[in-house]
Amino acid sequence: MPKTLVSPVIRKIFSIRSFSALGLIDPISNLAHRNIYVYHGLADEVVSAPVADEGAEFYEHFGANVQYNSTSLAGHSWVSPLGLRGSRTRPLVLTSALMRPARTR
């Protein structure tokens, strides 16, 4: 008998529903109408685009208002619309290079 292919997002949705029904996590209904920002840089070599796509799809499934930015030329980074000191005009960007120790010779 051939295997039925189930997308990773569908598997996660079933798991989350089970966890929520058992009271192991907050109710998934809390995700409805929440603002969620998903960011993926085109040069990201750490997280693949399909993983970010699945994250956006996951939240959309539960009714969240998802804003997905996947067109930036950035590498692996975390972008905050609030910036370093809460400024909305200067976003905070932490790249994986900033988190690595400096090389020594």
Image (tube, rainbow, N blue to C red):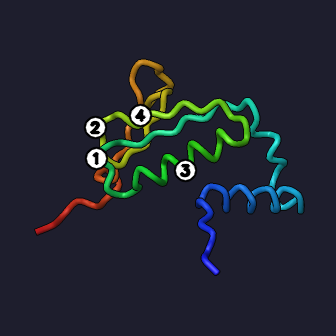
Q: Nearer the viewer, mark 3 or mark 4?
A: 3
Q: Secondary structure at mark 4?
A: strand
Q: Position of residue 73 (x, y in %)?
A: 28, 37
* Residue occupying the point 71% across, 55% down: 13
Please state, as top left, top right, bottom left or bottom right, where the N terminus lies in the image: bottom right
Please state, as top left, top right, bottom left or bottom right, where the C terminus lies in the image: bottom left
What crowding class fits label 2: few (fewer than 14 Cα within 10 Å), some (14-19), or many (20 or more)? few
* Residue occupying the point 28% across, 52% down: 97
Residue type at numbered disc 4: Leu
Q: Which quarter of the picture shows residue 91?
A: top left
Which is nearer the N-term, disc 3 or disc 4?
3
Which is nearer the N-term, disc 2 or disc 1?
1
| Distance from the alpha carbon under mark 2 to that under mark 1 | 6 Å
The single residue placed furthest to the top in the displayed view is: 89
Could you tell me if the residues under marks 4 and 1 are in contact, i.e. CB atoms within 8 Å?
no
| Distance from the alpha carbon under mark 3 to that under mark 1 | 18 Å
Q: Secondary structure at mark 1?
A: loop
Which is nearer the N-term, disc 4 or disc 1?
1
Q: Position of residue 36 (x, y in %)?
A: 61, 35
Q: Which residue is mark 1?
A: 43
Q: Nearer the viewer, mark 3 or mark 1?
A: 3
Which is nearer the N-term, disc 2 or disc 4?
2
Q: Which residue is mark 3?
A: 54
| Distance from the alpha carbon under mark 2 to that under mark 3 | 20 Å
Could you tell me if the residues under marks 2 and 1 are in contact, i.e. CB atoms within 8 Å?
yes
Q: Which residue is mark 4?
A: 92
Q: Is residue 22 above or below residue 80?
A: below
Q: Which residue is mark 2?
A: 73
Which is nearer the N-term, disc 3 or disc 1?
1
Q: Position of residue 84 (x, y in %)?
A: 44, 31
The single residue placed furthest to the front in the displayed view is: 1
